Image: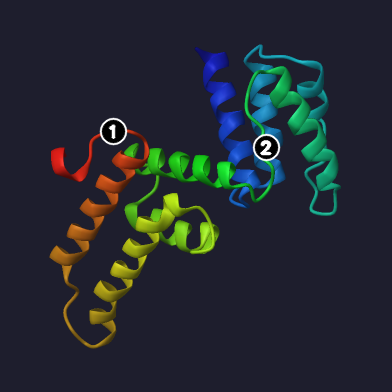
Amino acid sequence: MLGHDALTRLQEAAVLWSVGEATPADVIEAACDCLVADVDSPSLRILAGVSSAPSSDSEQLRRWLEDALGELSLTYYRKGSREGEDEAVRIMARRVLARTITPRYLTSWAYLCITTEGTPLAGELINLDNTYECVEAGVHDGQEYPTAAAAKVDADVIAEARRLVGGRTAENA
């Protein structure tokens, strides 16, 4: 199970790196975790040794990441690809459901990282980010924070996250 968890972390780090959410250090750390968990491949060993310094060559990271993922039967997503964005949205939705990030963080992330120009899969999350903005605007107008309205948006985000990961929909939640 350790190896499977390490592979999942590597795949997620690679996907999130492809959309700008993860850093090279996150990817390299996930590669090192794989080696510690007895998951090994020639390119994975090289990837684990790539420099994560800000001035390091991202082309080198991309090359060894692509090779390592292929050797491990994982999927490489080209930076900025629609498929990578789709998978990143699903990863972040799973994190909301696992309660490792908040619903508000998910919608902000979708708005800032994926944007309206990105995958349509994030469209409803971006709409919900705008809904949060409207709810929060009441605070700036001197009104009491509308807790019930924010809780409703949270519930809508969770329902959308379930839909995105293939779970229950809002209708049967």
Amino acid on which disc 1 is placed: Gly
| Above or below for 55 versus 147 | above
Color encoding of the figure: rainbow
**Residue drawn at (55%, 47%) of the image:** 85
**Residue drawn at (30%, 41%) of the image:** 163
Res. 48 visible in picture: no
Query: Quick one: 112 or 26, which is closer to the camera?
Result: 112
138 displayed left or right of 2: left
Local packing at callout 1 (Cα closer than 10 Å; few below 14, some 14-19, many 20+) is few
Q: Which residue is mark 1?
A: 167
Q: Counting residues from the N terminus, which is met first, the one under dot 2 or under dot 1? A: 2
Image x and y of residue 167, in percent: 28, 33
**Residue drawn at (44%, 40%) of the image:** 90
Q: Which mark is residue 27?
A: 2
- Please state, as top left, top right, bottom left or bottom right, where the C terminus lies in the image: top left
Of badges 2 and 1, the one in the foreground is: 1
38 displayed left or right of 2: right
| Above or below for 158 versus 41 | below
Amino acid on which disc 2 is placed: Val
Image x and y of residue 170, in percent: 19, 45
Instruction: Label 2, secondary structure: give it.
Output: helix
Query: Quick one: 124 or 156, which is closer to the camera?
Result: 124
Instruction: Label 1, secondary structure: give it.
Output: loop
**Which residue occupies the extreme bottom position in the image?**
141
40 displayed left or right of 15: right
Spatial CA distance of label 2 from label 1 is: 28 Å
How many numbered tags mark residues here? 2
Q: Are marks 2 and 1 in contact (CB under 8 Å)?
A: no
Image x and y of residue 44, in percent: 76, 23
Image x and y of residue 134, in percent: 28, 75
Local packing at callout 2 (Cα closer than 10 Å; few below 14, some 14-19, many 20+) is many
Q: Which mark is residue 52?
A: none
